[in-house]
Amino acid sequence: MVLERLGSSIRKILKKVASASHVDKRLLKEVVKDIQRALIQADVKVELALKLTKALEKRAIEDDPPPGMTLREHVIRIIYDLMVEILHGSKEIKLEKQRIMVVGLYGSGKTTTIGKLSRYFQKKGLNVGVVAGDTHRPAAYEQLAQVVGAINVPIYGNPKEKRAERVVREGIEHFKDFQVVIIDTSGRHSLELDLKEEIERLSRIVRPDETILVLDATIGQQAGPQAKSFHEAVGVTSVIVTKLDGSAKGGGALSAVSETEAPIAFIGTGEKIDDFEKFDPPRFISRLLGMGDLQALLERADEVLDKEKAEEISRRLLSGKFTLREMYDQMEMMSKMGPLQKILSFIPGMPGKLSDEELEEMQEKLGGYRVMMDSMTEEELTNPKLIKSSRLKRIAKGSGTSVDEVRELLKQFNMSKKTIKGIVGNRKMRRQLMRQFKDQGMDFGE
Ligand SMILES: Nc1nc2c(ncn2[C@@H]2O[C@H](COP(=O)(O)OP(=O)(O)O)[C@@H](O)[C@H]2O)c(=O)[nH]1
Ligand SMILES: [Mg+2]
């Protein structure tokens, strides 16, 4: 698979987030560091990696998760978005009459890609002609002829002619009634002056609708400066990244695209003519990170956490400890529709299964409780008996509620406490409760 290593290291990081018992600042900082390391190892430019992870840190710490999303999911979402961002968008090459000039260094995959691109247009029902504008390498004409010959796409060229301008001018004339004309060009080992001048001259002759830069994914970070100089010479409008099948360092080429304003249109994933796909960053990243697995992982993590929390609450209940916090946690567990709702359904004072309205009501109540509890001191939370007249007023004021609402909360608390005490204090009932917990697979370490 493409970019195997980057994919697997980011996956590991996501797993860490998904299975952490608490997502907090410390974990986020750690995750940001991990991602930086993974990006840099995949040859993403250091400055870009830093810039992106800074943005990640800022968003993860400062933005509240959108409604209905946990912090955990939120962070995973941000990491995913970040990865998509690295890829700098994508581009659709239009299916219309056009001239396409293909540029790139020697061996980057221009000729192979022209075959793939011709096939793409051909499949969409457009007629295509290719011009053998690489007059530099002796066997270039034959190679192109062979590649497009296999799919019956006509070629114009002259293996004896050394002047690329001449071949290209004639080729364009030759294919003037064709819908798509693709022009192959020479490469060098680097963008030397003579190559730069040659493609500039050709570009003036062709007046291309699209100038596609072919970038070899295996060259890593060199892709950046390369993309930049080609862009300065002829104005790149799209990029095709090749050899993503064999490259662990594809991050370099993928991120190099931010050096041109040109997005990636296609990627090459093998030597064969059909090893070619439209570039779709979200899909690409989802596949790279195994988002399907990740979704399942997130769900499992939630279950595990719910179970751990349920165990902890049950343990506290059995110990006879019951403060406002226990009540809140217990209600929160109940309001979270989930596989564990059943486990908690026997908790005194709680309905067996919540209907949608009851659920909504409870969540609303909880929201209010949370606000009031935030205005209480540690002492008051553990010992709500202390909450009398002046404290009542203070809490109401601090939470923007009324004294009656605070009283209502305390009333609910006293009722719950009474029932809990009644059950836990009764040996028989206590045993029964314990057995129920255990039947549900809860582990009390006894
Ligand atoms: N594995 C793999 N090899 C490729 C891909 N694209 C091109 N190649 C190979 O790269 C080499 C150079 O390709 P070529 O098209 O001749 O490059 P050019 O010099 O830019 O025209 C050839 O051996 C191709 O088979 C790709 O997407 N994956
Ligand atoms: Mg070639």
Image (cartoon, helix red, strand yellow):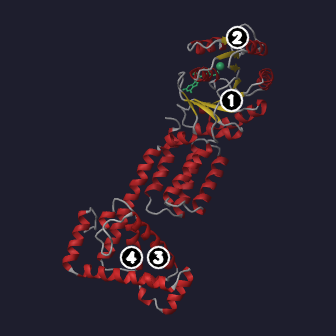
Sequence-wise, the earlier of marks 1 and 4 is 1
Q: Do the residues labelled 1 and 4 touch (CB within 8 Å)?
A: no
Which residue type does callout 2 highlight? Gly
- Of badges 2 and 3, nearer the viewer stands 3
- Of badges 4 and 2, nearer the viewer stands 4
| Callout 2: SS | loop
Coordinates of residue 18 in the picture (x, y in percent)? 45, 55
Distance, label 3 to label 1, CA atoms, is 60 Å
Distance, label 2 to label 3, CA atoms, is 79 Å
- Of badges 3 and 1, nearer the viewer stands 3
Distance, label 3 to label 4, CA atoms, is 10 Å
Residue extending farthest to the bottom is 389
> Which residue lies under the disc numbered 3?
369
Distance, label 4 to label 2, CA atoms, is 82 Å
Label 3 crowd (10 A; few <14 / some 14-19 / many >=20): some
Which residue type does callout 3 highlight? Tyr
- Of badges 1 and 4, nearer the viewer stands 4
What is the number of the mark on residue 157? 2
> Which residue lies under the disc numbered 4?
327
Sequence-wise, the earlier of marks 4 and 2 is 2
Which residue type does callout 4 highlight? Met
Coordinates of residue 57 in the picture (x, y in percent)? 60, 58
> Which residue lies under the disc numbered 1?
213
Coordinates of residue 93 in the picture (x, y in percent)? 65, 30
Sequence-wise, the earlier of marks 2 and 1 is 2
